[in-house]
Image (cartoon, grey):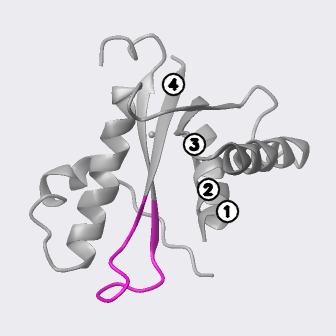
Amino acid sequence: MSWCAFVDESESNRKLDPDVYILAASVLPVGSCDVVLRRRKCMERLLFELPAMGVYEVMMEAREAKQNRHDMALARAMRARKEVPSGFRVDHAFGSGEPLLWLPDIVAGSIVAARCGDPCHLAPLMPLVTICMIKA
């Protein structure tokens, strides 16, 4: 089975949880998408982890064009270094036009809330969530 990921981000509360940046991915079977994802370091780790789960297509939330180009450059560099497979694809879509990007947004927001003292939203998601800590 082939998988794809939808990726979104969230910054934590700078006062309660300083220096934390969250990237979350929702991993879904390709084909089910019509029915049903310190930034650079985080993204590099995320893109490295996804192929190990069988993910070869990633849809990230679009930001400014220049920022999107940086994302694509990182993916190309990782392919060149063979840190991700040659067929690994990264694309962008606006969250307003791609509801599946709302899923990682919910996960990232739940992680931020839990780190700031309100774990009630993250608790039911934990069986489905993998958290990787990255030190700058």
Quadrant in the picture for residue 12:
bottom left
Q: Earlier in the sequence, mark 2 or mark 4?
A: 4
Give the number of the mark in front: 2 or 3.
2
Spatial separation of the CA atoms under disc 3 and disc 1: 15 Å
Instruction: Residue at 24% x, 59% y: name it.
Output: 110
Q: Please name the residue that numbered disc 3 is placed on.
A: 50
Q: Please give the residue where the numbered disc 1 appears in the rendered image.
A: 40
Looking at the rendered structure, the secondary structure element under dot 1 is helix
In this picture, residue 30 sits left or right of residue 115: right
Q: Position of residue 91 (x, y in %)?
A: 63, 30
- State if disc 1 and disc 2 touch (CB < 8 Å): yes
- Residue at mark 2 to residue at mark 4: CA–CA distance: 18 Å
Disc 3 to disc 4, C-alpha distance? 9 Å
Q: Secondary structure at mark 2?
A: helix
Residue 43 badge: 2
SS state under label 4 = strand
Q: Which amino acid is tagged 1?
A: Arg
Q: Position of residue 108 (x, y in %)?
A: 34, 57
- Give the magenta part as a residue range: 10-22
